[in-house]
């Protein structure tokens, strides 16, 4: 790679537009024939479709790559190699990585994000998966002390779930996130950083204990209420996605109107990548409460964890997880001294996979890998019903 490479005109405009949304100010990608005193050099790592994956400064990046917090041993090895290349200033030689010079990032008033140090932070930007509620995540890094790091989530689309996290996530006792700032006009939310590590593991009894603590024991929904909620979600999605209804309707009809479902506080994306384990401890904290729900459904987070782990982290997808899910569900209800049988299990399962499928479809679209996975579960349940 040359010392400085430049994006095409179209890519340049796309990247500059993204940065304007993130920082709410004029940003420019510097061309070869231009020089500006306020320009800074950043590494840009792009996805296969040329969209931005993450951005980090060429110089003074003390802890930045550590925030990637990999979940698998394979990823940990890759991250170690990235850190070595970054330290040796060879990071830009990697495929899909370029070194751009950007104007407009200096003299930002970092205090508006809750940054209290006189020295400006080093900034590491990660851009989330493209969806309706897409966010970018900024790590404001103190080169001298990792504990001073702040995480800033910035909405880069008109639709945002940050307000929900700030209002709903704060009142949940199970959420230990420390919120620093919320700005509704610029759509950003600042949080304290939690150090630790991630790992991919099967759902275990510690997870079950945690989730059972979110159940609202005295409050239940009838099957008719739950089905009405699902139809409301279905009616809110785009017309192009409603072709799935013939597969959903017969399955939804198997849920009895008289069935009763426990309510619960719900995280909304309880998955391996959202659990931070404390070093040398069995304790963990849950991050990313953007989809939190004070009136969610019991077992929803439990099922979600098992399905996401199977979808994203299993080499050979399981054709039948029911026996494991049933065992974990029994342990879950045992924690709240509630009865639970096989019929209850399948009623919950049908409701959860349909509801989760529609919510994910609405937000991420039909090409999302987890949406496809959930739809396959729905088709499999329909086939069982026809046998």
Image (tube, helix red, strand yellow):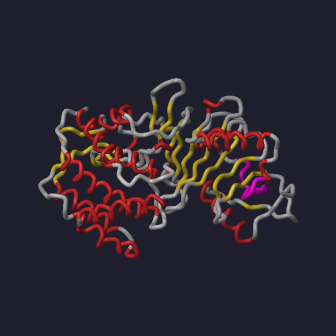
Q: Is residue 221 left or right of residue 318?
A: left
Query: Which is nearer the eye, 349 or 61?
Result: 349
Query: Which is nearer the eye, 319 or 208?
Result: 319
Q: Residue shown at 43%/63% (left/top)? A: 372
Query: Which is nearer the eye, 229 or 110?
Result: 229
Query: Which is nearer the eye, 73 or 104?
Result: 73
Above or below, 375 against 126 in this view is below
The range drawn in magenta is 94-107
Quadrant containing the N terminus is: bottom right
Q: Is residue 167 left or right of residue 32?
A: left
Q: Residue shown at 50%/41% (left/top)? A: 200
Examine the rendering and report whether any part of residue 97 can be seen: yes
Q: Quadrant of residue 156?
A: bottom right
Coordinates of residue 23 in the picture (x, y in percent): 63, 54
Q: Residue shown at 31%/39% (left/top)? A: 328
Coordinates of residue 386 in the picture (x, y in percent): 23, 67
| Residue 168 magenta-highlighted | no
Coordinates of residue 103 in the picture (x, y in percent): 76, 56
Quadrant containing the C terminus is: bottom left
Coordinates of residue 134 in the picture (x, y in percent): 52, 58
Above or below, 18 against 167 in this view is below
Q: Quadrant of residue 380?
A: bottom left
Q: Residue shown at 38%/31% (left/top)? A: 206
Examine the rendering and report whether any part of residue 111 can be seen: no
| Residue 99 magenta-highlighted | yes
Q: Residue furthest left?
A: 258
Q: Residue furthest front?
A: 387
């Amino acid at each position: 790679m040359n010392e400085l490479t430049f994006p095409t005109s179209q890519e340049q405009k796309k990247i500059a537009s993204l940065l304007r949304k993130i920082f709410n100010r004029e940003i420019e990608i510097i061309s070869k024939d231009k020089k500006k005193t306020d320009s800074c050099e950043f590494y840009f790592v792009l996805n296969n479709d040329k969209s931005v994956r993450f951005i980090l400064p060429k110089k003074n990046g003390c802890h930045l790559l550590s925030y990637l917090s990999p979940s698998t041993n394979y990823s940990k090895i890759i991250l170690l190699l990235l850190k070595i290349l970054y330290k040796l200033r060879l990071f830009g030689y990697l495929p899909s990585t370029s070194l751009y010079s950007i104007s407009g990032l200096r003299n930002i008033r970092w205090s508006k994000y809750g940054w209290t140090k006189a020295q400006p932070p080093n900034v590491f930007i990660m851009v989330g998966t493209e969806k309706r509620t897409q966010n970018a995540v900024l790590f404001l890094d103190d080169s001298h002390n990792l504990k001073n790091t702040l995480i800033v989530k910035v909405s880069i689309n008109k639709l945002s779930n940050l307000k929900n996290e700030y209002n709903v996530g704060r009142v949940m006792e199970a959420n230990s996130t420390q919120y620093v700032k919320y700005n509704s006009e610029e759509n950003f939310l600042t949080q304290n950083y939690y150090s630790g590590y991630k790992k991919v593991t099967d759902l275990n009894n510690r997870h079950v204990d945690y989730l059972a603590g979110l159940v609202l024991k005295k409050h239940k929904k009838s099957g008719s209420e739950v089905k009405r909620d699902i139809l409301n979600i279905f009616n809110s999605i785009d017309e192009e996605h409603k072709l799935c209804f013939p597969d959903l309707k017969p399955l939804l009809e198997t849920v009895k109107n008289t069935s009763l479902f426990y309510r619960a506080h719900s995280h909304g994306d309880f998955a391996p990548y959202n659990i931070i384990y404390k070093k040398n401890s069995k304790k963990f904290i849950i991050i990313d409460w953007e989809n939190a729900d004070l009136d969610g459904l019991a077992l929803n987070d439990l099922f979600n964890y098992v399905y996401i782990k199977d979808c994203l982290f299993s080499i050979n997808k399981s054709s039948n997880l029911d026996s494991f899910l049933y065992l974990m569900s029994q342990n879950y209800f045992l924690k709240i001294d509630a009865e639970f049988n096989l019929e209850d299990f399948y009623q919950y399962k049908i409701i959860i996979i349909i509801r989760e499928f529609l919510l994910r479809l609405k937000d991420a679209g039909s090409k999302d890998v987890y949406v496809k996975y959930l739809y396959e579960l729905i088709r499999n349940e329909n086939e069982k019903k026809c046998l």
